[in-house]
Amino acid sequence: MSLSVTARAATFAQVVKRVFALAAPYFRSEEKWRARAMLLGIVALNLFYVYVAVLGNQWYGRFYDALQNKDSAVFWREVGVFGWIAFANIAVQVLKFYVTQLLQLRWRTWMTRDYLSRWMSDRTFYHLELARYANNDGQAPDNPDQRIQEDMQLFTDYTMTLSMGLLNAVVTLVSFVGILWALSGSFAFSMGGSSYQIAGAMVWLAVAYCVVGTVITHFIGRPLIGTNFRQQRFEADFRHHLVRVREYSEAIALDKGEKVEHGQLDLRFGSVLRNYLVLIKQQKNLITFTSFFGQAAVIFPFLVAAPRFFSGAIQLGQLMQISSAFGKVQDSLSWFVDNYDRVAVWRATTDRLTSFDDAMRAHAARSQSLERDGTAPALQTGDLTVALPNGTSLLAGAALAVQPGDSVLLQGPSGSGKSTLFRTFAGIWPFARGHVKVPEGAVFMPQRPYVPDGTLRNALAYPQPAANYSDAELRQALVDALLPDLASRLDDSDAWSQKLSGGEQQRLSIARVLLKKPSWLFADEITSALDAEAEGVLYKRLSDRVKAAGGAMVSIAHRAAVGDFHNQRWTLVPQLEGAPAGGARYRLETAAT
Ligand SMILES: Nc1ncnc2c1ncn2[C@@H]1O[C@H](COP(=O)(O)OP(=O)(O)OP(=O)(O)O)[C@@H](O)[C@H]1O
């Protein structure tokens, strides 16, 4: 089932439950007292705001009566009273805005930090991406960047403004229903020979007016929920693709891939536009009705109360009070009508955050099928099975061992799972079973190193702080990794992943390892972009360092010459179908070189 269908199917009670589940942690966090006090303050300000509105309504009665009676003394006194009411109104509005914004900001900050720390911990960010490709059924959350950056802001904003708006509407309704009831008189009619009187007729008329309005709005506006949900998703997909084009600009330019990328961007933007058009049409229908509903509400109370005014039963002041009170009652009863599209966005946002939150919780609660000990004296695996996200087994029942002093070259056809075996040793591949023991502090060098933007000093020390190393150590590492020209540029700031050549990036990654001096090293095609001479020099340096530190090295490399630096060879050999390898695609053969 897709998320948009889930979004539509969710009942109101479920939505409230979800909102509560997303909102409650902040109000129970270490900031709870401040958060609760601010919330209470905002509630109090909202109540006071309604009280000021009640004062305003009473003022209407006195003011218009003074006009009708041409009583200038009362008129001028009421002008003064108006000044006070207006001042209170302005002050409470400003305060309400300020405290609400502050609470929203604090709440968003807390939520963003909480989600960020859960997303970044236990490699959740990586596993959720894997799960997305593994399931591909729309259940795993897409675009986590959008959820963290945009949805969090929308959720805190809309939850505050909508809930306070609703509170305001309810309190206004309760306050003004009383006023309207007292002013409205009763409605008399006869039916079947008997006559009837309905007390508080204006109140019932307002209720009937708004119930009809709300029901119609709900039917007209219902499709907006799904459309809003899809809109946010299409916008995020479009943005994500733009970012990818920027990131891979060089490769795309060399491939002359502009046309394809342009087409892809057009396609995504097309989805944004098509859905937006649907959204506009749905909003147009909704606005047509809500505008009609709002305009009719201006004249409606006058039409109903005018006969009593003309008959002299009520004064102009009372008529104006009735109209203003009807307006307030109608306003609060049509809160839902007025906020329908915001509620739609809010529900879509809530669904997106809930599925993200659920995915992170499920990830945290998942049972580990791989037993991993990261503090062993040597590398050892037992009954190790490595599979792909779709369940295909690459390797089954592998028992491997590497002792200090060893150096192993892992080879096999492209795509056979060499890097995946390293991912399993590193403990980041969730589709593995069995047990693995890995020495503490083992360093894994990936095929494509990550080089952060910023100073060269930081890129070299990554992920440790550059302050951990002296300038001399940093320079020496660059020289040892055959990057002497960079040794004088430690404080230069740049987008190194764009500026450095592939080989330079590989040498920078080797410089990092030389700097950290690990005893155990797992190197995945770390010299594939280097010439044979540089490859030989760097492999010798690395294996000498590792041996001197009493550790071992396991390398993946396609070139035969790399074998000179290793005393063992592991080879992933393809299995014929039906061969006894536990149903796996490959079997691992070990041999001394
Ligand atoms: N995140 C992923 N989702 C799905 N399949 C994946 C993922 N990562 C790797 N694979 C698949 O796992 C298989 C093994 O990939 P791996 O990178 O381990 O191969 P390799 O032996 O290191 O290849 P090469 O020599 O080309 O680097 C491949 O078929 C690859 O498509």
Image (cartoon, rainbow, N blue to C red):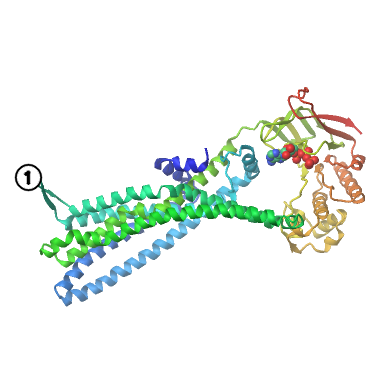
Residue at the image position 67 percent from the left and 31 percent from the top: 391
Quickly name the residue at label 1.
193
Please give the name of the residue rendered at 87% of the width and 55% of the height, measured from the top-left corner. 482
Nearest the viewer among 271 and 307 is 271
The answer to which of 26 and 558 lies nearer the viewer is 558
Residue 180: x %, y % from top left? 21, 56
> In the displayed structure, does residue 107 sit left or right of residue 402?
left
Left or right: 20 as drawn, with respect to 496: left
Circle 1 crowding by C-alpha within 10 Å: few under 14, some 14–19, many from 20: few
Identified by mark 1, the residue type is: Gly
Quadrant of the rendered structure where residue 118 is? top right
Query: In the rendered view, would you say 307 is above or below 8?
Result: below
Give the residue displayed 92% in from the left and 40% down from the top: 564
Residue 366 x %, y %: 60, 34
Secondary structure state at the residue bearing disc 1: loop
Residue in the foreground of this view, choosing between 528 and 117: 528
Camera sees residue 576: yes
Q: Give the quarter the ligand 1 occupies.
A: top right
Name the quarter where the C terminus is drawn: top right
